[in-house]
Image: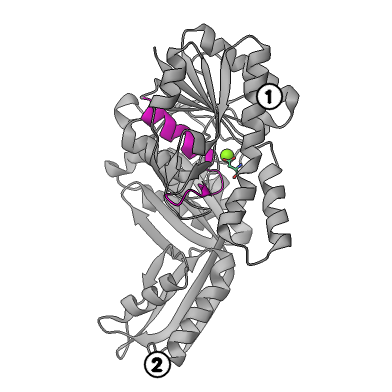
């Protein structure tokens, strides 16, 4: 029998009434003849509350106990979902991560999934159970401790189950009705996409679009899991929402699929570092040892053997980055004049697989920004995206003008 994975996010299970609505939707799929694996998040706001309790109790908390606490939100919704289905006459039971067991690495609070045995759940399907409700976001480490997969991790749980059970599809129910060309709260012309390629979704997710956890898209791409993002608040037809799928399954698309933005960016410049082999390695190994996630990197042309090095990182890591660079300077590992931090920047990116075969995308993007008088501070590109750092106060304007310039309101 075919297996369908359905994942319900926090707002879709925010109270008993919503759990009932979600369960009804599960019932519809069961009636179509699927065995269903339901992955649930914690009720909306619950994980934040649990994290808050941990931080208040112990600011430098033991990550194993953090996971023990924050994973509990999903246990509640899994049990309630199973009960609701049973009340509807649908044979269902719940599983916590360790019961499956969903095995993960020991990296508490950001563990990686290592394996999902299918025998246990399949045996129950064989006995007539129709729905397995699994608590998302959690697993068990080789040491037998409860782990969590990082915020937003139940998306990743869902995709991993879809891959393990060779599911026909993985439906992600959320509070938006799909993936948009850009954030509709910023740009009213944003258009819902019927389909988007894995690569594009991966870039958009990692560049700041918040619909799916980046790792879930990575996993879907690797295992060819057809992912559908749709709203649990609207009546659904079979082709509702957005399908995230292989490039080959998309007939024709715009050169640019979407515009992403992230406000949580800072730019740091090291003034006057020596321009010789090994210096970049020293700078960025000091930063990575300090746990700084460096994103963009630009090196200036040098003058008299010295150069400036600019990089970006999340705003909340600026202090840590400065500290690491100071330390390296004190230890005489690095020699630079000063570090200048600009914490008022944002990153705006255009993404599209069409860029591989079309030229002129960068020119059009830079022209649109300059027409608005927006200065570009740093540029990076990959095969399918162009990102720029700009003053944060221009974020909305930049997104809107890029959306207009690439005519994303129009489908091809
Ligand atoms: N409840 C967890 C969170 O809020 C996991 C999830 O919902 O995906 O991050
Ligand atoms: Mg989520």
Residue 19's disc number? 1
Quick check: can you spot residue 68? yes
Q: Position of residue 364 (x, y in %)?
A: 41, 49
Q: Is residue 170 rendered magenta in the image?
A: no
Gap in Å between the C-alphas at discs 1 and 2? 59 Å
Quick check: can you spot residue 12? no
Which residue is at 53% across, 53% downward?
109
Which residue is at 39% across, 20% downward?
168
Quadrant assignment, res 263: bottom right
Mark 2 highlights which residue?
A: 332
User: What's the image's color scheme?
Assistant: one colour
State the residue in front, 192 or 47: 47
Question: Is the residue marked by circle 1 packed among few (<14), some (14-19), or many (20+) residues within 10 Å?
Answer: many
> In the structure shown, which secondary structural element does the residue marked by tag 1 occupy?
helix
State the residue in front, 159 or 58: 58
Dot 1 or dot 2: first in sequence order is 1
- In this rendering, the answer to whether 245 lies above or below 337 is above
- In this rendering, the answer to whether 203 lies above or below 322 is above
Which residue is at 62% across, 22% downward?
82
Q: Position of residue 101 (x, y in %)?
A: 45, 36
Quadrant showing the N terminus: top left
Q: Answer yes or no: do the residues labelled 1 and 2 have beta carbons within 8 Å?
A: no
């Amino acid at each position: 029998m075919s297996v369908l994975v359905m994942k319900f996010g926090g707002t879709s299970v925010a109270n008993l009434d919503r759990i009932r609505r979600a369960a009804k939707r599960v019932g519809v799929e069961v009636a179509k003849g699927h065995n269903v694996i339901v992955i649930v998040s914690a009720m909306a706001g619950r994980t934040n509350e649990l994290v808050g309790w941990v931080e208040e109790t112990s600011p430098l908390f033991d990550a194993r106990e953090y996971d023990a606490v924050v994973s509990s939100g999903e246990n509640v919704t899994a049990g309630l979902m199973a009960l609701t289905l049973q009340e509807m006459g649908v044979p269902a039971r719940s599983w916590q991560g360790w019961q499956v067991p969903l095995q993960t690495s020991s990296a508490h609070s950001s563990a990686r999934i290592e394996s999902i045995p299918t025998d246990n759940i399949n045996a129950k399907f064989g006995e007539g159970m129709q729905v397995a409700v699994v608590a998302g976001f959690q697993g068990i480490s080789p040491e037998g401790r409860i782990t969590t997969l990082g915020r937003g991790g139940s998306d990743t749980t869902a995709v991993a189950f879809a891959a393990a059970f060779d599911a026909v599809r993985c439906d992600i129910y959320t509070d938006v009705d799909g993936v948009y060309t850009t954030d509709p709260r910023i740009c009213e012309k944003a258009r819902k996409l019927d389909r988007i390629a894995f690569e594009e979704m991966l870039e958009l997710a990692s560049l700041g679009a918040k619909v799916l956890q980046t790792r879930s898209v990575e996993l879907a791409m690797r295992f060819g899991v057809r992912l559908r993002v749709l709203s649990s608040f609207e009546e659904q037809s079979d082709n509702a929402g957005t399908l995230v799928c292989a490039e080959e399954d998309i007939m024709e698309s715009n050169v640019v699929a979407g515009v992403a933005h992230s406000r949580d960016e800072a730019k740091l410049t090291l003034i006057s570092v020596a321009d010789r082999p090994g210096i970049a390695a020293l700078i960025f190994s000091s930063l990575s040892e300090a746990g700084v996630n460096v994103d963009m990197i630009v090196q200036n042309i040098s003058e008299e053997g010295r150069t400036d090095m600019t990089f970006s990182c999340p705003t909340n890591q600026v202090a840590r980055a400065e500290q690491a660079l100071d330390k390296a300077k004190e230890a005489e590992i690095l020699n630079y004049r000063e570090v200048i931090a600009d914490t008022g920047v944002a990153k705006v990116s255009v993404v599209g697989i069409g860029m591989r075969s079309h030229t002129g995308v960068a020119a059009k993007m830079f022209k649109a920004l300059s027409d608005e008088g927006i200065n570009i501070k740093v540029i990076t590109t990959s095969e399918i995206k162009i990102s720029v750092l700009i003053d944060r106060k221009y974020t909305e304007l930049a997104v809107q003008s890029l959306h207009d310039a690439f005519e994303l309101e129009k489908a091809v």
